[in-house]
Amino acid sequence: MSVCGAAADRGLGGNEWVSGTPSAALSREHLAQYSDLAVTWMQEYLRIDTSNPPGNEMRAAKFFKKILDEEGIENRVFEYAPGRGDLWARIPASSHVSHGQPDMAHPTPEQGPAKRPIILLNHMDVVTSVAAHWRVAPFSGDIKDGYIWGRGAQDMKDEGLAQLVVMVMLKREKVALDRDVIFLAVADEEVGDTGTDWFIAHEGDLLEDAEFLINEGGENLLENGKVKYVGVDVGEKTTFWLHLVAHGRPGHASRPIPDSAPDRLVAALDKIIAYRTPLRVLPVVDEFLRDMAPYEPPERAAYYRNIRKAIQDKKFRDELDGDESLNFLLRDTISLTMLGGSEQTNVIPAEAWANLDVRILPGGDPHEVLEALRRLVNDPDVTIEPLEPNFRVANYSGTDNSLYAQIREVAAKYFPGTPVVPHITSGYTENQRYRPLGIVAYGFNPYTATDEEGNTEHANDERIRVEEVRRGPRILFDVVVGVAGK
Ligand SMILES: [Zn+2]
């Protein structure tokens, strides 16, 4: 079986028209206009410097607001701190039916209550950049070599822009909706999550008990010109950072102290580095690996088809240790990242410390991890404490719902033969904040990217192919209309 999607065969020109999708009902002329708008607006959006820190997201909120106002789309801006703000916009269910204009799909409004809303969530801030390291200035928005360049081109001004264009498409095309479509652009995702935290705390009613949310995350990997998989992030691990401190008698380094603080610390870290956290197979990871099995060599494929059995196999477990992209899916992980001891080479300090970046699978209990490490270290002179007093339990959304089904359907149209796979990301997204509100929250990206392009996220030369910017909004439109259209 080939991994291939047909998109490459059709040419990823960003202009192709895919029959059987909601967007295929729009005129070719309109579709081309939306693609043109997407490129122009993407350039403008990338030119707005929202490097965080400090953020200045109000600049981006004003950019969105101007467009939404011009299009007649209801919106509100909340400047919750100087220069920092969130923007909320909404196209209500069936809003256009009452205008007496012909609806493109179904002219008659259906009776009965609307379904719960879908939220299109994006963050407006970007990580910092050092212009000297870039081939194209990070806030130029320039088009060069088939790419639009700029900080945020992958994370996530690209997706925020696609969401904006979808709102404009829904409005202009007077799409009859059976649920509200909410656009929510927040500040400060990259540093403190204050935008989302503020919104949920102060304007949570505007989330209207939504059923679905689409946010950053997800990966549609383009390999050798073909889409290898459409990855939907259904969950994240949660960070649980730990601080170790070893205590001991200080002294002159010319007279070694056998159980000095640094020695104790190293002994504790030695145990932690050798420690293998328990393996645990989440249902979504099981589903992901079974979906990916056909694309793996025979031995690996056999493991993937029955991962619960594979983790009993010592050979597989040994392989797992060296497989960075698989290991984190099957266990909580621990990375040693920071170390400190004496300020002077000839002084044995009374304290030596280390920080661990621990990432816990959905459903895992941070307290249990902490207790396991304390038992393992088993030294009363080494303390282990969380770096932050409050930590969150990781969560994930299942796949048995109409949004996931619609993503499958749309992906099958644009990328025939390409598997749609649920994935747990090793990173963090704000979906974690919205799931406890009862919302099915996914990382889904309407763009494809090669490994090289995807890796420009948070790195130098961040960029996106122009053809992706042209096509992405259409793919997202087809997902949204499939879920929210009448
Ligand atoms: Zn992001």
Image (spheres, helix red, strand yellow):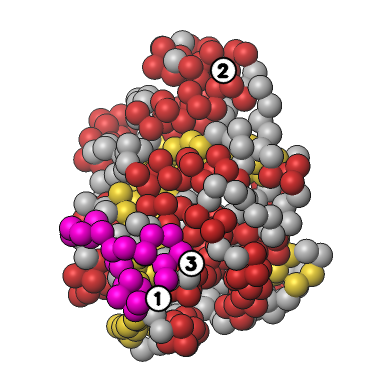
In the rendered structure, are the residues bearing label 1 and label 2 in contact, judged by CB atoms less than 8 Å apart? no
Amino acid found under the numbered disc labelled 2: Ala
Q: Which residue is mark 3?
A: 166
- Of label 1 and label 3, which has the lower sequence position? 1
Residue on which the image places disc 1: 101
Q: Give percent across and percent down for residue 151.
A: 61, 70
Q: Amino acid at mark 1?
A: Gln
**Res. 301 mark:** 2
Tell which circle, 2 or 3, labels the residue nearer the N-terminal end. Answer: 3
Quarter of the picture holding the C terminus = bottom left
The answer to whether residue 246 of the structure is visible from this angle is no
Query: How far is mark 1 from mark 2, CA to CA?
Result: 54 Å
Label 3 is placed on what type of residue?
Val
Say if disc 1 is inside 8 Å of ligand 1: no
Give coordinates of residue 407: x percent, y percent.
Answer: 46, 45
Q: Secondary structure at mark 1?
A: loop
C-alpha gap between disc 2 and disc 3: 39 Å
Of the pair 345 and 149, the residue shown nearer to us: 149
For the residue labelled by badge 2, is the local secondary structure a helix, a strand or a loop? helix
What are the residue bounds of the magenta stretch? 93-116
Q: Residue at x 51, y 46 (%)?
A: 410
